């Protein structure tokens, strides 16, 4: 089970939000490269970089920062935020980003998702962000959709997608832990492999998810708990790698 540190960007700075609300923005570092260097020194192989400006506006605003980190540190990067056209996605794929995270556009336009998956296969990954009960959100978590995580997951399985990122927005940035029972429901009802984001606050959360690895948990994304000292990344990576 891979452990992936998160770097969220607004105006080029490293920030975190609570429950996806932009008015809760808290800045941690002005230079995201320093953060990436820190996570790499503690064993990270991947970074989860989200362009929050892009998520809100529909245009990738912080791609150069992500590419600069990749070039200087040789880390694998999954990048999301603002990928709402084939042109932008193509630009990101050609830039050298390892994996593009699709959200709003893929939910609004299923043909875009099918075409993107056909073209790029596992170099794209769908992120489904949901609030309590499973209703999917879009546009940087600012708007509701008519889908829930269960009915939309069936649609994506039908086109061959087997792994997604899921974020429980009600828990993201709140440092109050994960809803293990709801995650089990998603695993059981969708049959998808999952990368879990949102609410991971302690090593115990990671240990709980590790126990579900055989049922389809492939990774975890950790944000605020790293920045505020609740989780030691080296220890978290070791838990994820443990075969026992």
Image: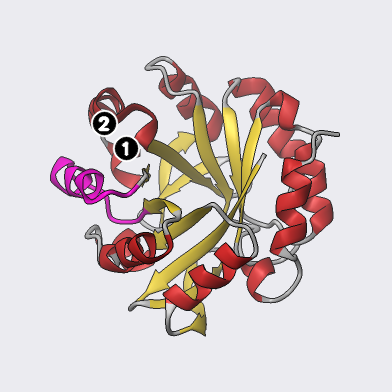
Q: Residue 74 sits in which quadrant?
A: bottom left
Secondary structure state at the residue bearing disc 1: helix
> Which of the two residues, 151 or 186, is positioned nearer the viewer here?
186
Residue 180 relative to residue 216: left or right: right
Image coords of residue 222 (percent x, y): 62, 58
Label of residue 106 in the image: 1
Image coords of residue 65 (percent x, y): 32, 69
On the question of residue 23 being in view, the answer is no
Residue 4 relative to residue 1: left or right: left
Image coords of residue 106 (percent x, y): 32, 37
Decide: is 45 above or below 145: below
Residue 185 relative to residue 148: left or right: right
- The span picked out in magenta is 80-97
Mark 2 in CB contact with mark 1 (< 8 angstroms): yes
Q: Residue 62 sits in which quadrant?
A: bottom left
Q: Name the residue under label 2.
A: 116
10 Å crowding of disc 2: few (<14), some (14-19), many (20+): some
Q: How far apart are marks 2 and 1 (CA)?
A: 9 Å
Image coords of residue 23 (percent x, y): 47, 78
Q: In the picture, which quadrant includes the N terminus?
A: top right
Residue 2 magenta-highlighted: no
């Amino acid at each position: 089970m891979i452990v992936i540190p998160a770097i969220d960007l607004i105006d080029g700075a490293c920030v975190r939000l609570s429950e996806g609300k932009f008015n809760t923005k808290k800045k941690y570092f002005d230079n995201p490269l320093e953060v990436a260097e820190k996570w790499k020194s503690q064993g990270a192989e991947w970074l989860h970089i989200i362009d929050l400006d892009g998520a809100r506006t529909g245009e990738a605003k912080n791609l150069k920062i992500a590419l600069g980190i990749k070039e200087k540190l040789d880390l694998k990067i999954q990048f999301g935020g603002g990928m709402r056209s084939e042109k932008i996605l193509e630009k990101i794929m050609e830039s050298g980003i390892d994996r593009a995270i699709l959200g709003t556009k893929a939910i609004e336009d299923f043909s875009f998702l099918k075409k993107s998956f056909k073209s790029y296969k596992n170099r794209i990954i769908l992120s489904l962000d949901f609030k309590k009960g499973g209703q999917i959100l879009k546009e940087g978590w600012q708007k509701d959709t008519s889908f829930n995580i269960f009915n939309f997951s069936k649609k994506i399985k039908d086109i061959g997608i087997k792994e997604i990122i899921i974020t429980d927005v009600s828990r993201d940035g709140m440092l109050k832990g994960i809803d293990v029972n709801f995650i089990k429901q998603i695993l059981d009802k969708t049959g998808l492999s999952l990368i879990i984001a949102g609410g991971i606050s302690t090593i115990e959360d990671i240990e709980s998810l590790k126990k579900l690895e055989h049922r389809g948990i492939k990774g975890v994304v950790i944000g605020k708990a790293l920045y505020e000292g609740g989780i030691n990344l080296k220890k978290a990576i070791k838990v994820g790698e443990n075969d026992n």
